[in-house]
Image (spheres, grey):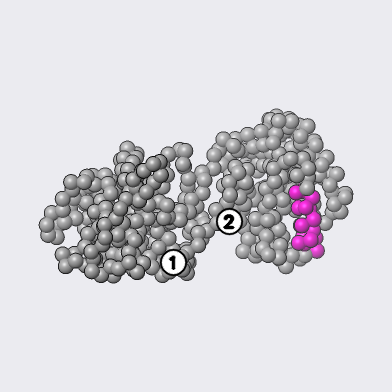
Amino acid sequence: MKRTMERFAALFCALCLLISAARAVSGGEEEELPEAELTFSDVSESDWFYAPVRFLASRGILQGFPDGTFRPGDTLTQAQLLKLMLSPYMPEDTEEPAGSGWWMPYGEFGLREGILSVEDLARLPEPADRLRTAELLARLPLLPVSEEDASVPDRENILAGIADLADIPEDGLEAVVTVYAAGVMQGYEDGCFRPERILTRAEGAAVIQRLLLPELRQPKLRSAMPEDWFSDALLLGNSHCGGLSMFGELPAGDICFSYGGSIFTGLDTVCRDRHERSFTLRSLLSEKQYGKIILIYGTNEMGYDMDYLRPWFKTFLNRLAEAQPAAEFWLCTAPPVNPELNGGELFTVENCCAVNDMIRSVAEERGYGLIDVYAFFADEEGVLPPECTGDGIHLTAECYRLWSRFLTATVLGLEPELPAEEDGTQTEQ
């Protein structure tokens, strides 16, 4: 289903206007508009769904039945969901035809704006399960669209956090990612999405309230990675640097890595780039001037006496600074190791901590940036978790991706977002 950017932007503006209309400005401060008392005989203030039902009813988005009930536990149909979704975008004078075709104005609007297909209309009498709800909601402008607020779904973390991911059809994954990223829908306290669970009318009201009031959401977005910061950057280091090259998500910049590489070979280190082409570090630095250099060393320096290692490390940094006088330097600590998996003779927690203490002290002494990879990955015992490594030293593809995101967040001055906590209820999130 194809939608033009003009329609998308128009819907986004309409949603923003509705959100603004939900509050009145008085004396420069926002105050909630007064909400009419609910008259539904089956809704009371003690009900968990009271607030969303009252909010939507006060704005004319939600109505009850002729007998004065709301019927919160009844199944939500796709037609009813469609009305809740599209009412905010519809003209105020929209009238519903009497009888079974009451949904026609919403269906026609959805077709016209590219939100629905003819096949979708045939499904409107069916119940709205959670997957179908996500698929329909994902067709609305849920995520930021301006370049200034641009953010992207934290896709891998979202999918990794869904306990019943195997139950979600492949063609529905992107819709689920979108609604999770926007915070309009979330999982249950056990981590499950439950795609086949049918929504009740009360649960539908809660979802639409989050659609209209972004402050109620718990979005799972990460900041877009600006390529301009990395455009003049060099990532330099050992095989971990190669892992970031192969599996990371760094958007641009040059990479120079050496399998088994250490500071002791200095500028004569034979490096490889993203395409496995070989060259010496000296030749690379003589051909191009960089604005930032990020160093990834420490793993192959474990086991040395720090009084011996520190002068070597400083000398290496001095040679780099002489060759790249305009560069801003960032030092990565070595990631933790797992002695049980690597044998524990050289790559131990003690040796890892010693070399990282040295790296931290040099970074502080020289005013270099620090990317504390060790602190990011180490468990309570200072060990690299087994799910992040196969040999106790190198990382898995997923953990190199996490490393690249942590690196990006650090150099851009951002705080990596922690997963949102669930509220402990088993109602629709």
Q: Amino acid at mark 1?
A: Tyr
Which image quadrant is residue 267 in? top right
Which residue is situated farthest in the front direction here? 27
In whole angstroms, how far apart are the C-alphas of marks 2 and 1?
A: 24 Å
Residue 347 drawn in magenta: yes
Query: Where residue 300 sits: x, y (%)?
Result: 77, 52
Identify the mark nearer the N-term, 2 or 1.
Answer: 1
Residue denoted by label 1: 188
Which image quadrant is residue 72 in? bottom left
Q: Which residues are magenta?
A: 345-360
Which residue is situated farthest in the left direction here? 98
The residue depicted at 55 percent of the width and 53 percent of the height is: 417
Q: Amino acid at mark 2?
A: Glu
Q: Is residue 378 left or right of residue 22?
A: right
The residue depicted at 36 percent of the width and 43 percent of the height is: 26
Q: Nearer the viewer, residue 122 or 53?
A: 53
Query: Where residue 59 sits: x, y (%)?
Result: 26, 52
The residue depicted at 77 percent of the width and 52 percent of the height is: 357
Q: Is residue 279 left or right of residue 306?
A: left
Query: Where residue 65 sits: x, y (%)?
Result: 19, 64
Residue denoted by label 2: 398
